[in-house]
Image (cartoon, rainbow, N blue to C red):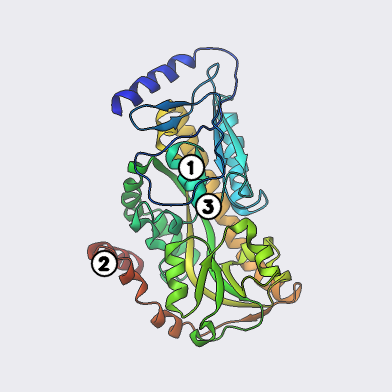
């Protein structure tokens, strides 16, 4: 693998001397190590990628000195992750003078969150941004930031996501062709319902609630007595509208920006899980880049992270009052102490290393 990557990097550096710029897009292939997850929508092979025979991973190819990466995500371009992704695209293309291009695929065009991650491990797409809990099928510890009621505010959660603890956890994803560039933010998850206001954990009993394919969130909802079922985000509004689900849970900006208030009457500010979002690139794509291109992409990713986090915090603060005063939702503020007790077993369910849990607790207590 190392010899193959070294050859590809030398070939890429040489091709940068060529003039002009073409395009390369995504190809299909299978990861050497891939957990059992959904098959991605994008199955069409690209014309300008090539397959690494040792790893069976599709690798982007330079055309006339230029390389094009695909960046897919499940929400719209107006969502904070979409806004930050467009900023990232613009900065990378400008700073590399077009030697690196980024094609954006929002609205689950290339698959839902779990499908996008699967596609990235095999090289069908090159980049994605998705909730930390969605990566637990690869590295269990990545979802630790989503444990229920772990953080009290945004600043606390950001310090943790930027800590050495998370950096060390992320190293485990390299084995699955996943390289973490930054951590976007999706906010703190809250519950909306069609008919029943949520004030106590008992109000969650047998609640037919949609969750993403996020192991930590699903287990949290189950611990509260609800009946969680997964569904792709792009299908969620319709499922709420036709009564397939009575409830769903998402951060405030997602609830407002996707007009879930049109099909849900009640909003409970539970803040039950912080939704960090690793912004990732396939390691195969990362290894093809020159050192200068890597530095540009890394800086652009961190700048996009700042934009995303700022937007999420601002929208969370602004949209709660809008949901109540302009959109007609009834908002409840449950006493969360009982919710915390009911979900205390979730960290045990995931069998995290005791030393890791101790280091996380110590970091937060600081």
Residue pictured at 46% horizontal, 40% vertical: 281
Q: Position of residue 46 (x, y in %)?
A: 55, 29
Mark 1 closeness class: few <14, some 14–19, many ≥20 residues within 10 Å: many
Q: Position of residue 85 (x, y in %)?
A: 59, 44
Q: Report the number of discs.
A: 3
Query: Where residue 104 sits: x, y (%)?
Result: 61, 40
For marks 3 and 1, give the CA distance.
10 Å
* Front disc: 3 or 2: 3
Task: Point out the residue furthest to the top here.
Answer: 18
Q: Does 9 appear above or below 89? A: above
Depth check, mark 1 against mark 2: the one in front is: 1
The one nearer the camera, 110 or 11, is: 110
Q: Which element is circle 3 on? A: helix
Q: Which mark is residue 358?
A: 2
Tell me if residue 210 can be seen.
yes
Sequence-first disc among 3 and 2: 3
Q: Which mark is residue 119?
A: 1
Q: Of label 1 and label 2, which has the lower sequence position?
A: 1
First-in-chain label (3 vs 1): 3
Which label was assigned to residue 296?
none
In the image, residue 354 lies at what x, y percent? 23, 66
Q: Is residue 87 left or right of residue 31?
A: right
Does the residue at mark 1 contact the one at mark 2 (Cβ under 8 Å)?
A: no
| Numbered label attached to residue 113 | 3
């Amino acid at each position: 693998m190392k010899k193959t990557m070294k050859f590809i990097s030398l070939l890429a550096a040489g091709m940068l001397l060529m003039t002009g710029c073409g395009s390369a897009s995504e190809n299909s292939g299978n990861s050497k190590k891939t957990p059992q997850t959904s098959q991605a929508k994008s199955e069409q092979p690209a014309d300008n990628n090539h397959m690494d025979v040792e790893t069976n991973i599709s690798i982007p190819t330079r055309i006339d000195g230029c390389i094009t990466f695909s960046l897919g995500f499940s929400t719209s371009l107006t969502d904070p992750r979409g806004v930050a992704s467009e900023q990232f695209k613009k900065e990378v293309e400008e700073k590399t003078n077009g030697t690196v291009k980024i094609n954006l695929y929002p609205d689950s065009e290339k698959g839902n969150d779990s499908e996008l991650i699967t596609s990235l491990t095999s090289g069908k797409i090159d980049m994605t941004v998705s909730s930390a809990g969605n990566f637990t099928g690869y590295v269990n510890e990545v979802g630790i930031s989503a444990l229920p009621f772990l953080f009290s505010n945004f600043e606390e959660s950001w310090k943790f996501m930027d800590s050495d603890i998370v950096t060390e956890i992320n190293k485990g994803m390299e084995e699955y062709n996943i390289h973490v560039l930054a951590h976007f933010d999706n906010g703190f998850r809250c519950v909306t319902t069609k008919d029943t206001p949520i004030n106590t954990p008992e109000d969650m009993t047998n609640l037919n609630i949609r969750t993403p394919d996020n192991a930590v969130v699903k287990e949290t909802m189950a611990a509260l007595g609800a009946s969680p079922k997964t569904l792709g985000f792009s299908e969620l509004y319709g499922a709420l509208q036709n009564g397939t689900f009575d409830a769903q849970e998402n951060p405030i900006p997602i609830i407002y920006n996707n007009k879930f208030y049109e099909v849900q009457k009640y909003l409970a500010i539970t803040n039950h899980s912080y939704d960090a979002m690793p912004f990732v690139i396939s390691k195969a794509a990362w290894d093809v880049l020159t050192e200068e291109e890597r530095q540009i992409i890394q800086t652009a990713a961190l700048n996009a992270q700042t934009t995303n986090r700022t937007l999420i915090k601002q929208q969370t603060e602004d949209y709660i009052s809008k949901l109540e005063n302009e959109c007609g939702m009834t908002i409840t503020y449950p006493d969360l102490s009982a919710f915390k007790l009911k979900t205390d077993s979730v960290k045990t369910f995931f069998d995290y290393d005791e030393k890791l849990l101790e280091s996380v607790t110590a970091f937060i207590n600081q």
